[in-house]
Image: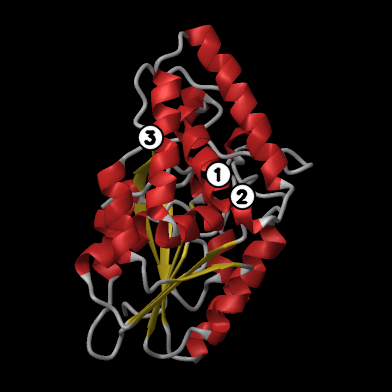
Amino acid sequence: MKPFLKWAGGKKQLLKDIEQYYPFSNDITKYAEPFVGGGAVLFDILNKFDLEMVYISDVNAELINTYRVIRDNNEELIGLLSDTQKKYLMLETEDRKEYYLRQRERFNNLKQSAIQSNAVEKACLMIFLNKTCFNGLFRVNKKGYFNVPMGRYKNPMICDEQNLREISKKIQKVEIVCCDYRESADFIDAKTFVYLDPPYRPITDTANFTAYTETFFDDAAQKELAGFVDKISKKGAKVLVSNSDPQNVDVQDDFFYKIYSSYQIKKVAANRMINCNGEARGKIKELLIDNFQF
């Protein structure tokens, strides 16, 4: 079982570092991930542990809709994705581009609609666009419209039936919520491991990939998140936070060391997987911040 979407900031490459923090035991039987994104850590945990309760959330409504459809209407989704894959792979490049643009327009029209009967089609389009767009990047403009151009993939796997069925089986009892991370507070208690993977603080002007929704996550929002970590730490929760390391470009930038001064901070190596500046890809450091590994 693996993530069903390619996601900017996905944690697949950091799993070996992150799994070192898993605290699950007879005392820690719940898991919360309020910025679930592509779900690499979620799926890793579901593969390895049988937990009492699991909660995931995100402010990206289309992403959360897709998780819910995989949980509740998976076979219908697989049918739509299979048909879409067959149609797309039969087309030549120019026809693919026209088909992609039509599907993108349909997705944006559905995105503005709250009609629940469109949920499966919207999830199908979300996965299709993710598998065929440039770099698998989910980006919206200020009006909330998905605006990523088509990528150049010869034979993309649009419908991974086996993986979708494995995911659906594993998330049947998962609470899936579209909301701000702060609303997870009611779920979190001393029996909970919480992983927080917010939109990263950009370390360069070209690395700002926080536009996954119409809202933005600036320094003030990062400070509010640190306050939330303080709040749930007082409840006894085990908390792990990931973020960028600004000292990649400015060794004097101690922003995270100030707002997380009461916590442990570890630097880990990562590859920048999705970046609008291709020359900027490569090894960098990221931060893992925790409240329990003393």
Instruction: Return the disc, 3 or 2, that comes first in the chain's sequence.
Output: 3
| Image spot of residue 80 (x, y percent) | 45, 39
Quadrant where the image shows the C terminus: bottom left
| Residue that appears at 42% across and 44% down | 5
Task: State the residue position of label 2.
Answer: 118
Task: State the residue position of label 1.
Answer: 121
Task: State the residue position of label 3.
Answer: 82
Q: Please, what is the three-letter code of the amino acid marked with disc 2?
A: Asn
Is residue 1 rendered to the left or right of residue 142?
Answer: left
| Image spot of residue 287 (x, y percent) | 43, 57
| Residue that appears at 39% across and 83% down | 192
Question: SS for tag 1?
Answer: helix
Q: Please, what is the three-letter code of the amino acid marked with disc 1?
A: Glu
| Image spot of residue 94 (x, y percent) | 54, 8
| Image spot of residue 243 (x, y percent) | 49, 56
Q: Residues within 10 Å of mark 3 (few under 14, many from 20)?
A: some
Is residue 212 rendered to the left or right of residue 29?
Answer: right
Image marks 2 and 1: residues in contact by CB distance under 8 Å:
yes
Q: Residues within 10 Å of mark 2 (few under 14, many from 20)?
A: few
C-alpha distance separating marks 3 and 2: 18 Å
The relative height of residue 157 versus residue 150 in the rendered view (above or below) is below
The relative height of residue 173 versus residue 134 in the rendered view (above or below) is below
Instruction: Return the disc, 1 or 3, that comes first in the chain's sequence.
Output: 3
Question: SS for tag 3?
Answer: helix
Answer with the quarter of the image where residue 91 lies.
top left
Q: Please, what is the three-letter code of the amino acid marked with disc 3?
A: Ser
Question: SS for tag 2?
Answer: helix
The relative height of residue 291 versus residue 276 in the rendered view (above or below) is below
